[in-house]
């Protein structure tokens, strides 16, 4: 019996040593990444100190070109947008940046499904930042959104990093030319028929998402950071764009309560009517993002100056 207990203890000791070694290994890979999501996640978590931050989902990541904004405004800019994510990921990312840096302005690209409607299990949006669950603000979100066992699982470096093995190694070998977090698209929409009114699926408000959205607004106010909510163009007619304004009623109410600007460019003349500036109905390509980023400079100047 004593031998059995000894072998069990040795086994768990070996696992602990391997886990600690993995922690050091993944930390090295994150800090030496040459590109990709590994570099972007590490920069946001550990180094980001830019004047302008972009937050939001794929429409944030694809539509705001930091280089254009930097050249026009004379301020540094980083795009923290993440495809398939919204307020949960955005809140966690700003929570990692806030202790070391307060930006001058944050542009938040609004996507109602990801920001305040019920869509998925909210814990899925924590996947992008699981590697950084040792940071207090991120760990707190895991506690709030995951099950009780998650706190125990997060003690394991192997668990926190098991979804990132391939990308972590690849991003240390290949530089993809990542530019300030921007993830442009390059295709061209092959149609001249603009998007119609999306079917009303009677989306319900997600109280958890909405509470994070309100807390984010409050945190920016406390930090004296200017926040501007924006909606970038779709390939859509002006008439149909206006019919979709009801999607933003919930957020507009918060904006009025806290005196935060909300700028809706769902339809923007010169962009929303040009299929060559889009990859699909909801996402502009690189040229579209460039033109849109140039167009919003005037909007941003009035909030920065």
Image (tube, helix red, strand yellow):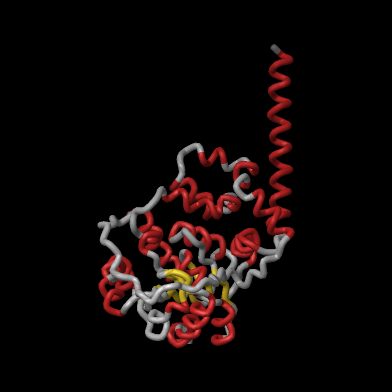
Residue at x-position 29% and y-position 57%: 203
Q: Is residue 24 above or below residue 254?
A: above
Residue 47 lies in quadrant: bottom right
Residue 266 lies in quadrant: bottom left
Give the x, y percent position of residue 237: 32, 78
| Quarter occupied by the N terminus | top right
Residue at x-position 49% and y-position 50%: 140
Q: Is residue 206 above or below residue 94?
A: above
Residue at x-position 44% and y-position 72%: 190
Q: Is residue 230 visible?
A: no
Residue 206 lies left or right of residue 123; in this view the side is: left
Give the x, y percent position of residue 215: 40, 62
For the image, the number of numbered tags is: 0
Residue 51 lies in quadrant: bottom right
Tell which of 67 and 93 is nearer to you: 67
Give the x, y percent position of residue 83: 50, 62
Q: Is residue 157 above or below residue 50?
A: above
Residue 293 lies left or right of residue 162; in this view the side is: left
Q: Is residue 74 above or below residue 117?
A: below
Residue at x-position 57% and y-position 43%: 154
Q: Is residue 135 visible?
A: yes
Give the x, y percent position of residue 103: 53, 74
């Amino acid at each position: 019996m004593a031998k059995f207990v000894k072998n069990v203890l040795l086994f768990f000791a070996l696992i602990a040593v391997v886990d600690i070694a993995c922690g050091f290994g993944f930390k090295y890979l994150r800090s030496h990444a040459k590109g990709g999501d590994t570099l972007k996640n590490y920069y946001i978590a550990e180094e980001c100190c830019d004047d302008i931050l972009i937050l939001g989902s794929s429409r944030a990541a694809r539509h705001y070109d930091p280089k254009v904004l930097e050249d026009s405004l004379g301020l540094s800019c980083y795009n923290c947008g993440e495809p398939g994510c919204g307020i949960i990921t955005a809140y966690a990312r700003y929570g990692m940046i806030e202790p070391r840096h307060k930006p001058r302005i944050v542009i938040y690209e609004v996507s109602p499904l990801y920001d305040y409607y019920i869509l998925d299990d909210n814990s899925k949006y924590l996947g992008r930042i699981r590697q950084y669950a040792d940071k207090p603000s991120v760990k707190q979100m895991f506690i709030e959104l995951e099950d009780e066992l998650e706190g125990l699982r997060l003690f394991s470096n192997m668990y926190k990093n098991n979804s990132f093995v391939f990308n972590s190694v690849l991003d240390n070998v290949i530089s993809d030319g990542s530019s300030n977090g921007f993830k442009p698209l390059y295709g061209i929409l092959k149609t001249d028929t603009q998007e119609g009114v999306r079917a009303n699926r009677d989306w319900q408000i997600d109280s958890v998402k909405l509470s994070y959205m309100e807390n984010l607004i409050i945190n920016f106010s406390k930090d004296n950071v200017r926040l501007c909510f924006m909606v970038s163009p779709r390939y859509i007619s002006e008439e149909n764009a206006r019919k979709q304004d009801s999607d933003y009623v919930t957020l507009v109410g918060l904006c009025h309560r806290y005196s935060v600007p909300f700028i809706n460019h769902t339809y923007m003349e010169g962009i929303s009517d040009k299929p060559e500036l889009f990859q699909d109905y909801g996402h502009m390509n690189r040229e579209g993002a460039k033109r849109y980023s140039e167009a919003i400079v005037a909007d941003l100047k009035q909030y920065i100056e």
